[in-house]
Amino acid sequence: MHRLLSLVILFAFSVSASNAADLDHLQSAKAHGYHLINSEIVERPYHIYVQLPDGYEESDKTYPVIYLLDGGTTYPMLTAYFLLLGIDEPMPEAIIVGISYGGASFEEGNYRSTDYTAPSPEREYWGGAEKYQSFLGTELLPLIEKTYRADKSRRILFGQSLAGQFVLYSAMTNPDLFWGRIASNPALHRNLDYFLELDVAKPSGDPLVFIGAASGDAEQFQIPRDEWLKRWEREDLPWTFEVETLEGERHASAAPLVFRAGLRWLFPATEEIEN
């Protein structure tokens, strides 16, 4: 019996080890670079995964960089999706950077509810967006642009839900930090007044902001988002701005489609970038 149990455990371990090793062969989701940043500004670690375009090593070109918030989820999903999109439609060659917490909960180090949010009277742990944006501008972006051939004039930021809130916060407070921003179902349900009252920084360039809104998003997200959008019916836009409704999608399911729609809008909106 003991021998049989040992053989079962050994078999299970070998299958597990084999499955883990097979991850190295997932060409669309693997990372060509990994960096652990122990942020002095936020005082927490971040796991940074970098995927390079095909032919990067043989080229001397610079590339747009797509920064993915919630990288623990969005990096494996959207790097694979980006590869497939390039088969059927024009997509720019790009470096993709996933910013991951390394876990799904506060206990595992995931502080998205702090990092991605402006202050809220309903949540004392919200309100870390200012520090997080400083981390991006002072620690992460310089690292990527020093290590890789990144085009500083073509930085793109993508975020879903609370990360979409951060995309809007960034556009309003430091519009020139990114050239393009894609916000998927931005969640402003606990701090809408902050965003309605926030003075908008004037960009020196012409940043682009794309918002994807799922038709089936929950009312708790739809209503504040639409209230925020109404603000721009009364004011001059500080950015080139586009809003697209995705029919039949819900809060989370829309994310990859918003990513696609946002990229298709961003790049034709300016000069063509060679593939």
Image: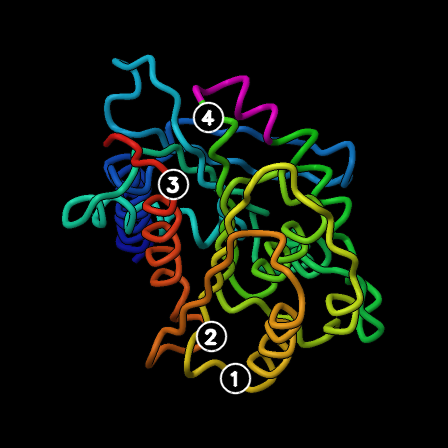
Asked whether residue 160 is drawn in magenta, I would say no
User: What's the mark number on residue 218?
Assistant: 1
Return the residue at label 2.
251
Q: What sort of colour scheme is used for the picture?
A: rainbow
Circle nearer the N terminus (1, 3): 1
Q: Amino acid at mark 3?
A: Thr
Circle nearer the N terminus (4, 3): 4
- Of 204 and 126, which appears nearest the observer? 204
User: What's the mark number on residue 270?
Assistant: 3
Left or right of residue 11: residue 48:
right
Closest to the camera, between mark 1 and mark 3, is 3
Label 4 environment density (alpha carbons within 10 Å; few <14, some 14–19, many ≥20): some
Q: Amino acid at mark 2?
A: His
Cα–Cα span, label 1 and label 2: 7 Å
Label 3 environment density (alpha carbons within 10 Å; few <14, some 14–19, many ≥20): few
Label 1 with label 2: CB-CB less than 8 Å: yes
